[in-house]
Amino acid sequence: MIDVKTLCLGVLSRGDASGYEIRKEFEEGPLSHFSDAGFGSIYPSLKRLLDDGQITMLPHNGDGRPDKKLYRITPSGRHALYQSLIKPPSADKLRSDLMFILSFGHLLPPRHLDRIISDRISDYRHMIATLEVEGSTAHRTPGERFVEGMGLAIYRAVASYLEEHRHELVAAALMESQVA
Amino acid sequence: MIDVKTLCLGVLSRGDASGYEIRKEFEEGPLSHFSDAGFGSIYPSLKRLLDDGQITMLPHNGDGRPDKKLYRITPSGRHALYQSLIKPPSADKLRSDLMFILSFGHLLPPRHLDRIISDRISDYRHMIATLEVEGSTAHRTPGERFVEGMGLAIYRAVASYLEEHRHELVAAALMESQVA
DNA sequence: TCGTTATATATCATACCGATGCATCACTTG
DNA sequence: CAAGTGATGCATCGGTATGATATATAACGA
């Protein structure tokens, strides 16, 4: 798996940013769908990238908040990023608590099952709606558009599957609860 | 996120197993699509579950290999599992090196882009084919069938998207490489 | 018989996650 | 106008997970 240092280099290859702004990129931006990193890994990564000369810290101008640290990628950093990008990508990994829980659906109260599935469907529908608006307004590189499209495709597939098959699971749980 | 201790309890709730067998469950079984755990986290988890009295180690019968340790879940373990299952599930997380790489598609050689996308499509097509056979033969609980169906739905969505949109990305990379 | 694969346990350095703490600024709401 | 709330911003720390590695036996075909 690609490490957080590389993720940071990726963000910085698009323009200067602070640690906080990098974090936001993984929370909201097009990269958020398939990557993730929190402060606890971003700040140490930036420190190491600085030491390795792959990024530099810009001298902050006196006005405004003096505590914001802006970072810029160096040629050495761009090279390191490129080397990471051409390595064969490891397999995709989907981790889902919900799916683990649902695989034990027969152990759970049917009403509870129904609730957590409904909640998740509306979560996904909400994300889809947001993405549809954003995708048509925000400016994106071809790569970003491609990745955002993939996110949309997956979210739609998940939401549809949940809607179309939820009754099978709840029915089975109902049967189980009547036996017990 | 659900921790590895709980994942182990989940597997053991279906029947006695060794650490190695638990691992296999996350590599091949229906749980493999949305959960993961390696030896480095399974063995320490089993140790802690033993200490906490949530599992017990079965006395291994003299014949056969004496080094295999079989574990069994206790009532206390079942209770702990249930408590974890009814907690509100955290958000799904999809991590994909490939998508991170493709979001910088314009920086990469078009031929290389084309290759890694092709490779990934055949990976997914292969997984889909395996799942279609297995799903119709293997015996599964309703929950497992549901989760396996979700895996199938997502893999299909990803493979289709890659096939239908790859040319957009490669075309953009070609343009870029001609400009440069 | 020799190499490879599967079974099986275990450890270790590194990396990551989530929570927490702290401070400032902007905005809104009574 | 005061007070509260939420966003911006940096940073650390304990607990947990990862991925590689080591070790050993069994099975199985070349």
Image (cartoon, coloured by chain):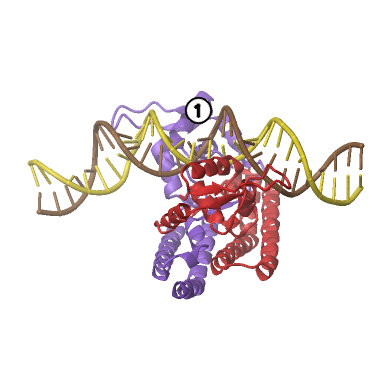
Chain colours: A purple, B red, C brown, D yellow
Q: Position of residue B46 (x, y in %)?
A: 54, 44
Q: Residue B27: x, y in percent? A: 64, 52
Q: Nearer the viewer, residue C10 or D10?
A: C10
Residue A152 visible in the picture: no
Q: Which residue is mark 1?
A: A48
Judge whether D17 appears above or below B171 on screen.
above
At x 62% / y 54%, what residue is drawn? B25
Residue B80 lies, with reference to residue A86, above or below; the image says: below
Classify mark 1: helix, strand or loop: helix
Quarter of the rendering containing residue A38: top left
Name the residue: 39% across, 66% down: A112
Q: Residues within 10 Å of mark 1 (few under 14, many from 20)?
A: some
Name the amino acid, label 1.
Arg
Question: Residue at horizontal 28%, vertical 30%?
Answer: A63
Question: x%, y% of residue D20?
Answer: 66, 35
User: B111 or A7, which lies in front?
Assistant: A7
Horizontal side of residue C13 vs A98, given as left or right: right
Q: Is residue A22 left or right of residue A141?
A: left
Task: State the residue in front, B168 or D13.
Answer: D13
Q: The C terminus of chain B lies in which quarter of the figure?
A: top right
Host chain of mark 1: A
Residue D10 position within the rendered picture, expressed as x and y whole percent measured from the top left: 37, 31
Q: How many marks?
A: 1
Direction front: furthest residue: B62
